[in-house]
Image: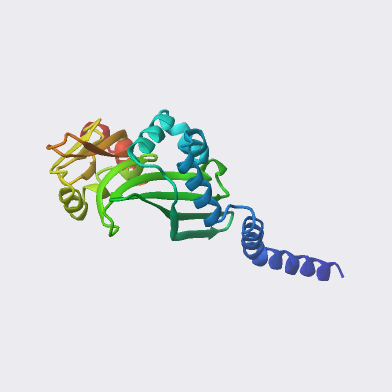
Amino acid sequence: MKNLSKKLISVIMALLFALAPLISVFAIKIPWMTTYPSEKDIAETLGNFLKARDVDGIVGMFSESVKSELDDLEIQVKKLLDQIDCDIKEYSWRGNGTSDERNYGYYRKSIGLTIEIVAEDKVFHVGVSYVQAWTDDEQKVGMRSLWLNLCDTSGYVVDYLATIGPSVKIDLTYKETKQCRMARHDWKGIHNEMGYNKLVITSTDESVAKVDSDGIVTAAGRGSARVTVTYINETTGKELEYLYDVTVTFTRWQWIIWYVFFGFLWY
């Protein structure tokens, strides 16, 4: 009888372990399917704030993590609104797709939107990246980035007017390389078409993150550095900046080399 009880307990425990992943997925998925705002809610809320030129309202839509990273968020929003040099009477919007990620212990969902404002001879596109759910870090829920493009009446982008959002994070191990996206050949061509004929790429610490003229970052040493990709229109003097925060660490084997084989002297 005692052996039977032990076997029964073992079977029950095995079933619980086997069902745990399914329980986790459904426990995460169902509650948040009805709590986060819809595309329509987000688009109409932002559209109405744009019409009213409500700086505080727009700032309030950003996530807490973005607010904490961008000290001048309110100033950036004011500058973006100033670039829309027409009365905003009407707007339309469209969705740009969603990202949905589920795993054991967390659920993440984000969407992209474009709000279109039409003036007499030009069109403004306001792009939005919005995090609807991020269960392992609620500070990330909210608007992640906002950008403003000037388009012609056919919708073709003529100029990038403003971009608001956190820097791009790049995590590298020692001697690893990665290219900054906005320095790629295709993005160079797009900026050149809009009159940004000069590209300057800098690093705040070359001993941590070396960067070449193509925006390829090489991890040169442990630490952190900021890489800035700047496009310059030499005719108007206007600049567009894209920021990348680089963190360089060692792999396990690199740590062994560092300590056991005196890598701190030669590595």
- Residue extending farthest to the front is 120
* Residue at 53% over, 45% down: 141
Say which residue appears at 49% left-offset and 36% top-offset: 54
Is 248 left or right of 73, judged from the image as shown? Answer: left
Percent across and percent down for residue 64 are: 52, 37
In front: 213, or 206? 213
Asked where in the image residue 34 lies, by quadrant, the reply is: bottom right
Question: In this view of the protein, can residue 251 be seen by the observer?
Answer: no
Q: Where is residue 244 in the image (x, y as percent from the top left)?
A: 31, 40
Q: In this view, does 143 lie to the left or right of 20?
A: left
Name the residue rendered at 12%, 37% in the picture: 235
Q: How is the image coloured?
A: rainbow
Image quadrant in which the C terminus is located: top left
Q: Which of 2 and 121 is in front in this view?
A: 121
Q: Is residue 198 visible?
A: yes
**Residue visible at 20% across and 45% down in the picture:** 215
Front-most of residues 30 and 73: 73
Can you say which quadrant of the picture contains the N terminus? bottom right
Direction from residue 68 to residue 126 in the image, left or right: left
Is residue 29 left or right of 65 when viewed as pictured? right
Residue 69: % across, % down? 43, 33
